[in-house]
Image (cartoon, rainbow, N blue to C red):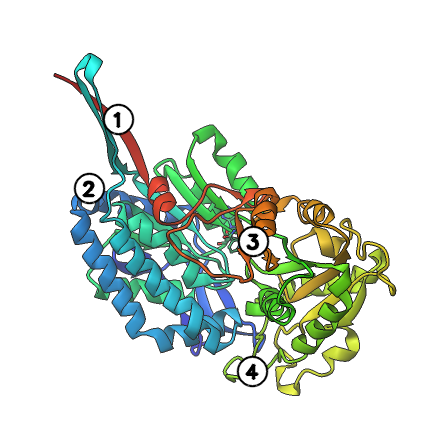
Amino acid sequence: MSADLLQLENFIAGQFTAPLGGRYLDSVDPSTGSAWARLPDSGADDVDAAVNSALNAFPSWSAKSAVARSQILDAIANQIEQHLDELAELESRDQGKPVWLARAVDIPRAVHNFRFFASANLHHLETATYQAEFSAQNWTIRTPVGVCGLISPWNLPLYLLTFKLAPCLAAGNTAVCKPSELTSVTAWRLCQLMTDAGLPAGVVNMVFGRGATAGEALVLHPNVPAVSFTGSTLIGSRIQALTAPMVKKLSLELGGKNAALVFSDCDLPAAVETCVRSSFTNQGEICLCTSRIFVERSVYNEFLRQFLEETAKWKVCDRRDPATKLGAVVSAEHRQKILSYIESAPASGGRILCGQTLTDAAKLPPELASGFFVLPTVIVGAETDSDGGLSDEAPCMRDEIFGPVTCIVPFDDEAEAIKRANSVKYGLCATLFSRDASRIMRVSRQLQVGTVWSNCWLVRDLNMPFGGCKQSGIGREGAHDSLEFYTEVKTVCLRF
Ligand code: NAD
């Protein structure tokens, strides 16, 4: 074992604990391609120990008043905020994203998740009715579900983990978390910060390792009645199948293939700026990124011209450079997957206008040669685009690539744009660009997605439900919805 690698351990019953099997995995820095940390390759026995710890902590944590739990969540938010620079550097190194992005988005959002749910839990969701004909009073009681299994992906590691953890704890549950094996470092660091904030031992347990072993043992554990999972549709549907015989409570936030619809009456430069940002932010590794842009034919050529001009400003550089727009993608395997979609696009009628073609790759600075970098890539259809452009069946239009790759195609009328936007198996989000409010209202109703952004992107209010339809998921997260998921509601009837 190399002494200069950061060594992570599981966090069980308030203690950093070596995995029972003694096995570790390397975690690779995507910007250099070299291992920089080691994490436990945990197995079912580690998961079992973590679930037992969470079970032991449950009676006293769930018995605390909402105010007492809220104070601890606020203290966790303060700890994260006080370590913002350190956490942003760790997140950037582990995931590949620019440091400024982690500093501006990922870590502040983790702070907000704890602050928001600390307060949201103080507002009651209970209902009551009186039935005069029976002289009966009915009311609801909410109780925590128990030990929750929280499984998170690698693209927004601390941001998405804390979006589960904060409401889970606020509602009085205890947790066993399984972060992505590719990006476990900020979750591990969070364990110490939560302890410093006064979180009692055992309330949060962290088991690191692979999905097929640690993750699957967690979802199958009989003492874990609820599983909140964010990740791919493939694994989400596997978890649904595995847990069906146990009738577990499941929240599934899955993949997307999100469309933008650009109408000719929009503010075109603003639409271009937003679509470039929504296509390439975080290297395109956000489930909400846009990867299909449908543009009304009368403005298509001008949109494309401005889009390519704006994309040229999105530099792929060192993650520590404040001018860097895109860092490295998360792993060599993921880079290979993205490149295979780009390279196969011409076979399904695609033209690559800029990005990761072989000649463009040579533009990368030599010091980035061993990292997993991909240039922002734009794919369009045939030379004239007099028809519908790229086919909806082309793999780059149909599959979630989850990288800095976007397709741009023309459309002729509103009905066609809606039909094409809805043609994929996913239904996570869409963006609309138009100055016509009645059009926005009409089109929003017809899009089969969980969120529609109009003339903006990624403006998130935690008060609002978030989630996907079709194969983008089951359930919603947000102030009300998360607290619904993390509680059981009981009706009590009293006749007097
Ligand atoms: P993934 O499905 O491969 O892994 C997600 C997590 O599940 C990881 O922690 C992984 O170790 C674990 N896992 C893998 N196999 C498992 C199994 N059999 N049982 C239990 N756990 C298992 O996803 P990823 O590659 O880490 O993340 C990218 C995907 O996540 C993309 O599809 C993206 O769209 C999606 N995503 C969705 C949202 C959303 O809110 N809808 C947000 C972010 C990412």
The residue at label 2 has a CB less than 8 Å from ligand 1: no
Q: Quadrant of the C terminus?
A: top left
Q: Is residue 17 left or right of residue 305?
A: left
Q: Earlier in the sequence, mark 1 or mark 2?
A: 2
The type of residue carrying mark 4 is: Asp
The type of residue carrying mark 1 is: Thr
Q: Earlier in the sequence, mark 2 or mark 4?
A: 2
Q: Earlier in the sequence, mark 4 or mark 3?
A: 4
For the residues carrying marks 4 and 1, which lies nearer the camera in this image? 1
The type of residue carrying mark 3 is: Ala
Residue behind mark 3: 437
For the residues carrying marks 4 and 3, which lies nearer the camera in this image? 3
* Number of other residues with Cα within 10 Å of mark 2, as a class: few under 14, some 14 to 19, many 20 or more: some
Are the residues flagged by discs 4 and 3 in contact, CB closer than 8 Å? no
The type of residue carrying mark 2 is: Pro
Residue 318, numbered circle: 4
Q: Earlier in the sequence, mark 4 or mark 1?
A: 4
Q: Earlier in the sequence, mark 2 or mark 3?
A: 2
SS for dot 2: helix
Residue behind mark 1: 491
Q: CA distance from mark 1 to mark 2?
A: 22 Å
Instruction: Give the x, y percent position of residue 476.
Output: 44, 44
Q: Quadrant of residue 368?
A: bottom right
Whether residue 19 is visible: no
For the residues carrying marks 3 and 1, which lies nearer the camera in this image? 3
Are the residues flagged by discs 1 and 2 in contact, CB closer than 8 Å? no
Residue behind mark 2: 59
For the residues carrying marks 2 and 4, which lies nearer the camera in this image? 4
